[in-house]
Image: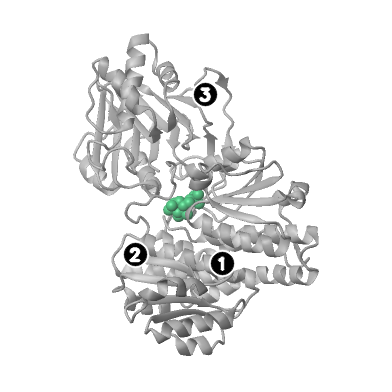
């Protein structure tokens, strides 16, 4: 959470920094700020609110300068207000710093600094860090890079930081531990950002800064990297594959709807070079390279957060069904602290769109320390989780900007399904007939999604009916239970309507008490998997006058006749139904939120990349 961006070069920094912040706003958007050096002045402007609020304020000020840093915040320490917004000045106002992460020992450091006469304006841990850097710099008479290095040796926590200094208009110093940081290398200029999205417009040559590394960006000079233990490193320059059009809305009103509509393409991209329908084959190099490990695994533990955790549940159903390996699905935040039993012959699969989620990263580190084999399923190429796992597969869904995850979810489910099918086939626990049928069906999924997307207008129409609702229940069984959880999460995230996902048969153990004519109940009642039993659950809702919105298989009449609204999806193999059933639920959540006037792409209090605990 929090987005950081920096620029030093020949161009005016302000427009580059603002555009960069807009691209990073998905990471946090409760306040924003910018620091620029112009004519020996180190100017800091910051406001509560979004980047647009910062622009309104800053444009009344001196925004000239060819060096600057900027920040968009997701509050941790201290409420979102102007004082707590970044950048933070040091005591002398000679240094300004932006920070993404948490300094855990800030209280102890703050006390020490107070004893040295430092005073503090904000409630943030970040201000403590810049005061510490200034204290170290002045008391040791060292340059900024050395001061940063010495100060970071006293710091416990996570950080990606960037600092500029009054009177030093040719240098930005930045460092990271735990939180991401990328340097873009242009022609006589450097870009700095939390991810590559603000950089791609200017250069495709980047360096991913490693943990505990400090980078010094000097105007017109080579990039310098050293570790906080003072070891020089050679920068490893990587060519980005991303394109600018992937970061634009492309005519859609929101990123979320663009990303929902991209799914036929993103699933094809996920399967490209992996699913070969002509040859009836799946080739997943992440599996092939580690075949023995998967075939001999006694247990698979899937760890993830949020939507990725829901994808993990679907993965569990598929791996247990096809590969007959016991699977446990863990919330990373619980797993990392509850002293789990992890053995050397366990495989831990970490699923993460961003590849940066702090809890999942910590779960990976824990599992690694116990000797397990760690496999990552991530979307963002080069992120921390794929860099810290033994092996893995990218989902190839392309940049996902909307805070509520959509295309990354279906891509994760696709990768997990391919993996389950490959393990099952190699182990001989999956019949050849089932394997071949499922491979053929996987190939048809993108076209089937297009069929569902064609019902967008109808979904938008009936979604209007439900803006009154305070609560929703989502029900599904088997593979559709995690889909119900995901549907409920989508609605909560973007429309602020309380929603609960439940296994349909569990309804009678509690949620049934909530059902009345006010309560919309979304039931996923597809023909593959326990259809009759779900029909009985629908009857129970009907008897209590609940409003039924059903997701059914094309041609269904029984459930349709019992429902107030019905969305049909094409028939497919049971394990692939989630890839289709999730789509109308994404669309429904989107349209309800739009009609309610909610900020769909940047829902309140949320952030896309959760790099704090
Ligand atoms: C945040 C996002 C969710 C996401 C979750 C896990 O809560 O808003 O959309 O599912 O983090 O993120 P990850 O990047 O690890 O998949």
Q: Are marks 2 and 1 in contact (CB under 8 Å)?
A: no
C-alpha separation, residue under disc 1 versus residue under disc 3: 42 Å
SS at mark 1?
helix
C-alpha separation, residue under disc 2 versus residue under disc 3: 44 Å
Q: Nearer the viewer, residue 54 or 526?
A: 526
Mark 3 crowd level (few <14, some 14–19, many ≥20, 10 Å Cα) = many
The label shown at residue 225 is 3
| Residue position marked by numbered label 1 in the rendering | 264
Expressed as whole percent of the image width and height from the top left, the position of residue 447 reads 60, 73
SS at mark 3?
strand
Q: Residue furthest left?
A: 60
- Which marked residue is nearer to the observer: mark 2 or mark 3? 2
Instruction: Answer whether residue 604 is visible to the viewer in this image.
Output: yes
Within the image, what quadrant is residue 374 found in?
A: top right
Mark 1 crowd level (few <14, some 14–19, many ≥20, 10 Å Cα) = many
Residue shown at the point (43%, 43%) measured from the top left: 198
């Amino acid at each position: 959470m929090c987005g950081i961006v920096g620029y030093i070069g020949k161009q005016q920094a302000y427009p580059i920094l603002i555009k960069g912040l807009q691209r990073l706003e998905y990471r946090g958007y409760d306040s924003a700020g910018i620091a620029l050096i112009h004519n020996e002045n180190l100017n800091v402007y910051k406001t509560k609110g979004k980047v647009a609020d910062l622009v309104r304020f800053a444009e009344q000020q001196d925004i000239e300068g060819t060096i600057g840093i900027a920040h968009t915040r997701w509050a941790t320490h201290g409420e979102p207000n102007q004082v707590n917004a970044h950048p933070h000045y040091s005591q002398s106002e000679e240094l300004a710093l932006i920070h993404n992460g948490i300094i855990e020992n800030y209280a102890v450091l703050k006390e020490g600094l107070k004893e040295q006469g430092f005073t503090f304006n904000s409630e943030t841990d970040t201000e403590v860090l810049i005061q510490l850097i200034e204290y170290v710099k002045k008391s040791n008479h060292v340059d900024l890079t050395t001061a940063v290095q010495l100060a970071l040796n006293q710091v416990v926590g996570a950080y990606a930081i960037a600092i500029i200094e009054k009177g030093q208009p040719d240098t930005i110093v930045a460092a990271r531990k735990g939180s991401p940081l990328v340097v873009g290398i242009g022609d006589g200029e450097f870009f700095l950002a939390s991810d590559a999205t603000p950089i791609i417009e200017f250069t495709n040559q980047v360096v991913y800064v490693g943990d505990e590394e400090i980078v010094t960006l000097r105007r017109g000079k080579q990039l310098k990297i050293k570790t906080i233990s003072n070891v020089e490193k050679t920068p490893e320059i990587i060519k980005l594959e991303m394109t600018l059009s992937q970061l634009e809305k492309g005519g859609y009103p929101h990123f979320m709807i663009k990303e929902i509509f991209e799914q036929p393409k993103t699933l094809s991209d996920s399967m490209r070079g992996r699913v070969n329908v002509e040859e009836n084959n799946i080739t997943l190099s992440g599996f092939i390279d580690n075949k023995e490990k998967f075939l001999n695994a006694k247990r698979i533990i899937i760890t993830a957060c949020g939507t990725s955790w829901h994808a993990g549940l679907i993965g569990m159903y598929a791996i247990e069904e096809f590969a007959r390996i016991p699977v446990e699905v863990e919330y990373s935040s619980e797993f990392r602290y509850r002293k789990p039993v992890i053995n050397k012959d366990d495989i831990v699969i970490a699923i993460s769109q961003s590849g940066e989620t702090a809890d999942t990263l910590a779960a990976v580190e824990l599992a690694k320390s116990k000797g397990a084999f760690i496999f990552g399923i991530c979307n963002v190429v080069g992120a921390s989780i794929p860099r810290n796992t033994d092996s893995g597969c990218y989902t190839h869904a392309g940049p996902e900007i909307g805070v509520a995850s959509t295309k990354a979810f279906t891509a994760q489910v696709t990768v997990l399904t391919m993996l389950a099918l490959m393990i099952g086939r190699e182990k001989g626990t999956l019949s050849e007939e089932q394997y071949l049928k499922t491979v053929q069906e996987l190939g048809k999924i993108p076209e089937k999604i297009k069929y569902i997307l064609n019902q967008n207008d109808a979904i938008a129409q009936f979604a209007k009916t439900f803006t009154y609702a305070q609560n929703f229940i989502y029900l599904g069984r088997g593979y559709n239970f995690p889909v119900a959880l995901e549907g409920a999460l989508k609605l909560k995230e973007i429309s602020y309507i309380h929603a609960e996902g439940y296994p349909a048969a569990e309804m009678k153990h509690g949620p049934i008490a909530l059902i009345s004519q006010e309560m919309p109940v979304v039931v996923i009642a597809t023909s593959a998997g326990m259809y009759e039993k779900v029909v009985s659950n629908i009857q129970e809702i009907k008897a209590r006058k609940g409003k039924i919105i059903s997701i059914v298989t094309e041609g269904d009449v029984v459930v349709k006749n019992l429902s107030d609204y019905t969305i049909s999806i094409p028939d497919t193999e049971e394990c692939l139904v989630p890839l289709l059933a999730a789509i109308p639920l994404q669309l429904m959540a989107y349209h309800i939120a739009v009609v309610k006037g909610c900020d769909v792409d940047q829902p309140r209090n949320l952030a896309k990349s959760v790099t704090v605990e």
